[in-house]
Amino acid sequence: MNGCDECNKRSPIDRSKIKNTEFTIALAGNANVGKSATFNQLTGVDQIIGNWPGKTVELAEGLLQYKGHRIRVIDLPGIYSFTTYSMEELVSREFIALEHPDAVINVVDASALERNLFFTIQLIELAPSLLIAVNQIDLAEKKGITVDTKKLSELLGIPVVPTVAIKGKGISSLTDAILNLVSASPVPPVLQYGKEVEERIAQIISQLGAVKTAYPVRWTAIKLLERDPEIVKIVGAQNSQVVETADTLAKEIETMHGEPVCVVMSAERYLIADRIVSEVIKIRTPVDGKPKKSLTDWLDQVALHPILGYLTVIAVIGGLLVWTFLIGAQISSFLTSFLSHFERYEPVINGSLLNILWNGAFSGFVAGVTLIIPYVLPFYLILAVIEDSGYLTRISVMLDRGMHKLGLHGKAIIPLILGYGCSVPACMSCRIMESPKQKLLTAFLVTLVPCTARTIVILGLVATFVNIWWALALYAFDIILIIVVGRIAFKAVPGESVGLIMEMPDYHVPSLSVILKQTWARTRSLIWIVFPAYIVGSAVLQAFYAAGLLNPVNTWLSPITTLWLGLPAVVGITLIFGIVRKELTILTLAVLLGTTNFASVMTPVQLIVLALVTMLYIPCISTILVLASEFGWRKSLSITGIEIVLALIVGGIMYRVLSLFM
């Protein structure tokens, strides 16, 4: 079988960043098995975060130098199978099949070996040079589970190394095993399924002679039998007869077993996994004959309780929001006050062009600092602690049913919560969603969540000059609007949504090194977007404003601002400045009106409407850039356009409704 030349040229990360690499290895496995900890132990601090070309799936790359060898290490997304229900699964199998790494390290959890071997068996089908790292041996032993790694290696025909990655145990042996595997280039083993399945796999293989794919012949035959849509499409374009034959053979298996062929194949894999586990695992029986409850069992009695579980989720989410609205806001205010001593922190009208540009650029720099330090860094740090401890999956499971109403699942709560701090990292965190439809839908809803900057506008206009209850009413209205718009978008956006499939890992004390590295990796990617956008955007807008080029905007927008929204004409410019940063709406309004007592020049209805429109209309420039990098400019501008229209429609209706009784 010959690989496609064009496909083989693809590279997920710029190879120029790491030159003269002798070997490339990939880490693959389920989520929460210690794969990231293994990656960090192998690569240390020499890591690069990049995307597979054309996709939003993130891959971590690092360089290992060991005994004179340079080894490029790729950390693939944590997945459970090689079906194509999610982009992560497709990217992982494409990397292994098309990039041809010198070795694949399958990291498995020693305490959940049978479940992990289900994926291992699929890896064996893909026929790479494979090595297994049986991780978390220490946790398994605490549960009374002992794994015979030598026996496991014999049964699978694959090298097996026990590790405790979070403590660095077994990493040296693992690295030696990698070098041995790369130099030996062993023949991949073949695991035999039931007779009726093997006979039909053989029939499909016999017809694949002239068909060219980048995948192994046996794996291609198995996927045709399972009716994998990607493989059916590739093979069908060359020989439709093979696809028809595979479909006929699949129906024969379904008739014999009374189950869909994919269910039969899953059962075959689990049968092999069960047989292997029965030979390699020994479980100590407690002295009293009763299994001892682990810490995870005790904690899950609360975390997954139908009442206490939700209260715990509310407490955790509430803690994050308290940081956003209280502690983070105080730190941001302090930083703003401190940095304001070095330069004016409001739009400059008079002065030299250089002074105007510098002040604009500096205000953009201040915006970046007061966003990253008080909000983004702490949020990512807390999120990494929750994630690495094992509690994040419990939050997702508890909220899964409610998220289904929006066509999403429990994982979506993380970007939505993050949106209350800042839309930029929230949009980037949508990568945790499985399907492209769910990623886009989550990002769209995230941009409707009032971030900290929009909160400043709501509090500065409504809570201060109307009352706090109207400010809270705007938040309640926003939640209702997200639910309604989410339901509409779910029906309108093409594509499929997938259910929640998540590993429930044991609780453990988070690793400080893992937390810090994850936090920095996530924050670093934001810095390159946020600071340039804020600095350049602020400088350009202030230069345009000082030159009087934005004044005609008021006249041009007056049919919307004055006639439809019932606002003062000067609001047109403030909304333009709000594109760079939402809180500039208030700063610009104060400069133009010559007062910070907005109640003296605007009615309560106007204040509420302005806050509502600011809350809903076009995201800030940094959010637009992130959306474009994640989904492309067409979808980014579509979301922007929809939200402008939505803000204007809702704002105009609200103005007329409120005018009736205020």
Image (cartoon, rainbow, N blue to C red):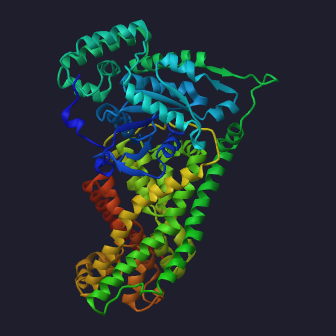
Q: Which of these two is toward me, 562 or 361?
A: 361
Q: Which of these two is toward me, 104 or 641?
A: 104
Would you say residue 618 is visible in this rendering? Answer: no
What quarter of the picture does the N terminus occupy?
Answer: top left
- Residue 543 rendering spot, x and y as whole percentages: 27, 83
Q: Which of these two is toward me, 214 or 253?
A: 214
Q: Which of these two is toward me, 622 or 128?
A: 128
Residue at (54% x, 50% y) in the render: 514
- Residue 192 rendering spot, x and y as whole percentages: 42, 12
Judged left or right of residue 44, residue 439 is: left
**Quarter of the rendering containing residue 59:** top left
Is residue 391 positioned above or below 551 on the image? above
Would you say residue 627 is visible in this rendering? Answer: yes
Residue at (53% x, 77% y) in the render: 333
- Direction front: furthest residue: 68
Residue at (21% x, 25% y) in the render: 2
Judged left or right of residue 662, residue 566 is: left
